Amino acid sequence: MNNQLIVSISREFASGGRVIAKELAKRLNINYYDRNLLDEIAAEKLGNVELMRQFDEAPKGFFLTRTVRGMTSSPEENIAQIQFEYLLKKAESGESFVIVGRCADEVLSEYPGLVKIFVLADEDKKVERVCELRDVNVDEARGIMLRHDKKRKAYHNHYCTIKWGDSRGYDICINSSRLGIEKTADFLESYVRQRIIKMK
């Protein structure tokens, strides 16, 4: 397990974090996981992946949910715990991978091969990206960004000790607007490769 590498990428919505994560996984020749983790879980447990996706990376809903003897009726909490356990199983197997979100920065914090990255971007660049990808106007783009980041923040902060986006919780925080997506990936690849050298 000494050569294990786990790259955890947390990101603001429309910062390009997911694209960067996929690119890093490709360049480092390791597996990539984000919401596709649910496909694997559903296949293994014969679950309904579409139903799981409704509650993926969602904060716990408190309306009509209750916890009795450690068991919860919250689907959001159940999906989160299933994903955390699945990630730990992958890490324990010695697999190297890139994981987007899913509180991996804290869930997998005991693993020495973990590199924790947070990707952010300037608001105007994110708005521009959302307008282009979603074919919406500026106000709609801002609304989409606000909803997604509010949800991610609430989800992360519910399960983690260090708050979402707090630089103390990551090895590196980077603004993808400064270099652009491709060159940010270049920079992060170089950083991760230097970390690999230090791990040996």
Image: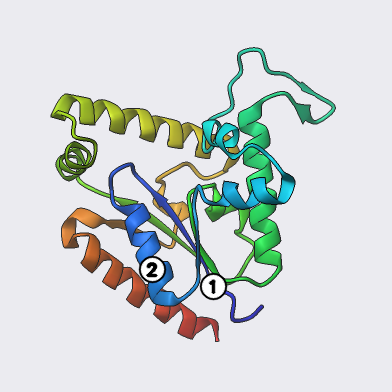
Amino acid at circle 2: Leu
In the rendered image of this protein, does residue 138 appear above or below residue 97? above
Q: Secondary structure at mark 2?
A: helix
The residue mark sitting in front, 1 or 2, is 2
In terms of sequence position, does the residue under pointer 1 or pointer 2 come before the other?
1
Residue most extreme to the top: 64
Amino acid at circle 1: Leu
Q: Measure the alpha-carbon separation of dots 1 and 2.
A: 12 Å
Q: Residue at x 54, y 47 (%)?
A: 102
Q: In x, y percent, where is residue 38?
A: 58, 46
**Circle number at residue 5:** 1
Q: In x, y percent, where is residue 116?
A: 47, 60
Q: Residue at x 33, y 77 (%)?
A: 190
The quarter of the picture where residue 158 lies is top right
In the rendered image of this protein, does residue 146 appear above or below residue 199? above
Circle 2 residue = 24
The reply, left or right, for residue 128 in relation to residue 108 is left
Q: Nearer the viewer, residue 135 or 77?
A: 135
Q: Secondary structure at mark 1?
A: loop
Q: Quadrant of the C terminus?
A: bottom right
Q: Residues within 10 Å of mark 2 (few under 14, many from 20)?
A: many
Q: Quadrant of the N terminus?
A: bottom right
Q: Residue at x 66, y 49 (%)?
A: 43
What colouring style does the render use?
Answer: rainbow
Q: In x, y percent, where is residue 96?
A: 57, 71
Q: Nearer the viewer, residue 151 or 197?
A: 151
The reply, left or right, for residue 161 in relation to residue 91 is left
Q: Nearer the viewer, residue 28 or 70?
A: 28
The reply, left or right, for residue 61 in relation to residue 47 is left
